[in-house]
């Protein structure tokens, strides 16, 4: 399941659809599991009337969590050594997200990946990197 | 944030994995996990963030007997302070701009962590979509029951002058 140095080339890509038509209920699930009950993510009345947004929106960490699923499906379980992201656009209920990892380098049995998650309009919602141990 | 005791529990990992739409058996099936390289159930890469559940003072969780700023009868349960500072994107303590994790080892059920957070850099930037942006960094060190550093997490939060234009 783990990646091998000999099978990796700079520029290789791996992609997954993270979610189709994101549901408010999944955002609620994430609030419950993570403990982040910020009303901006689950409380439409507060978010539209007080905060001034068109609707609730996903936790950045939900997008990072789903993107992490793509990464671990690629590099294998327990292999990550680093994982970092920037949240560049908000993710809304109804969004469909696709995520791609691109091999940037393979050195000393560590693969470095560039990560990008985009919504259905092609806007980048998350960009980042991951590093993982790979086998000889 | 300071968390004295963050117990890593199998059912919490299961619920967390479900919430990110990850049905990987390594997050819930101990028998399956025993035959994998990690050798046990492990937590997904972003699980450490749920240490908020064990932070007694975490401000984004309603607390018994305290006002909560989400809606009830009114759109918010807290009266807006006149001249209060920072829109924070309209309440809610601002938005999450960046998150970085460094894994020294992966978490598994039975671990009991402590977490200590220190403030990092702060900076400002002007943006077209949300006015002035005020960034602040915090660095959290998660240590296990033996005092070993297991995860270093760096978060960057941003407060915006006004809600982000869509």
Image (cartoon, coloured by chain):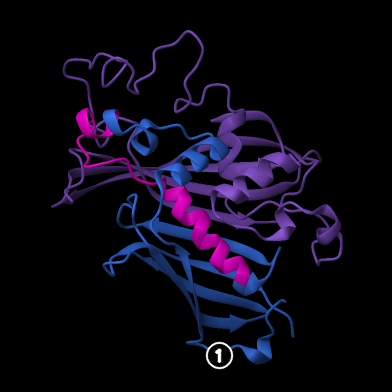
Chain colours: A blue, B purple
Give the structural element (helix, strand or loop) at label 1. Answer: loop
B135 to the left or right of B33? left
Q: Chain of mark 1?
A: A
Q: Is residue B47 visible?
A: no
Q: Position of residue B137 (x, y in %)?
A: 42, 44
Between A22 and A117, the residue placed more toward the observer is A22
Q: Is residue A121 visible?
A: yes
Residue A71 lies in magenta, yes or no? Answer: yes
Circle 1 Cα neighbour tier, 10 Å, few/some/many (<14 / 14–19 / ≥20): some
Q: Quadrant of residue A70?
A: bottom right
What are the residue bounds of the magenta stretch? A46-73
Q: Quadrant of residue B29?
A: bottom right
Q: Residue at x 55, y 90 (%)?
A: A9
Q: Position of residue B154 (x, y in %)?
A: 50, 48
Q: Residue at x 27, y 33 (%)?
A: A47
Between B16 and B72, the residue placed more toward the observer is B72
**Where B11 falls versus A131 (above or below)?**
above
B41 to the left or right of B94? right
**Where B125 falls versus B53 (above or below)?**
below
Specify the principal SS of the magenta part: helix
Q: According to the image, label 1 marks what residue?
A: A9
**Where A54 falls versus A118 (above or below)?**
above
Q: Position of residue B126 (x, y in %)?
A: 17, 49
Q: Position of residue B65 (x, y in %)?
A: 48, 7
Between B159 and A23, the residue placed more toward the observer is A23
């Amino acid at each position: 399941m783990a990646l091998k140095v000999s099978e990796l080339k700079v520029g290789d890509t791996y992609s997954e659809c993270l979610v189709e038509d994101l549901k408010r209920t999944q955002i609620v699930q994430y609030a419950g599991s993570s403990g982040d009950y910020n009303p901006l993510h689950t409380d439409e009345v507060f978010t539209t009337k007080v905060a001034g947004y068109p609707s609730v929106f996903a936790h950045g960490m939900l997008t990072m969590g789903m993107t992490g699923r793509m990464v671990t499906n690629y590099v294998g379980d327990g292999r990550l050594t680093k994982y970092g992201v920037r949240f560049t656009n908000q993710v809304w209920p109804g969004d469909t997200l696709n995520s791609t990892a691109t091999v940037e380098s393979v050195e000393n049995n560590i693969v470095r990946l560039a990560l990008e998650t985009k919504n259905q309009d092609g806007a980048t919602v998350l960009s980042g990197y991951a590093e993982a141990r790979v086998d000889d | 944030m300071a968390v004295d005791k963050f117990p890593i529990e199998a059912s919490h990992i299961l619920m967390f994995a479900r919430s990110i739409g990850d049905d990987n058996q390594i997050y819930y099936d101990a028998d399956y996990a025993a035959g994998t390289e990690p050798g046990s159930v492990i937590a997904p890469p972003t699980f450490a963030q749920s240490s908020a559940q064990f932070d007694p003072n975490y401000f984004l969780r309603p607390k018994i007997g305290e006002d909560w700023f989400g809606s009830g009868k009114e759109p918010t349960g807290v009266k807006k302070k006149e001249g209060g500072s920072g829109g924070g994107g309209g309440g809610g303590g601002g938005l999450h701009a960046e998150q970085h994790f460094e894994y020294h080892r992966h978490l598994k059920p039975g671990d009991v962590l402590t977490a200590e957070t220190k403030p990092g850099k702060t900076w400002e930037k002007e943006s077209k979509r949300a006015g002035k942006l005020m960034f602040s960094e915090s660095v959290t060190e998660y240590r296990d029951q033996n005092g070993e550093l297991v995860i270093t997490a760096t978060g960057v939060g941003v407060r915006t002058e006004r809600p982000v234009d869509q």
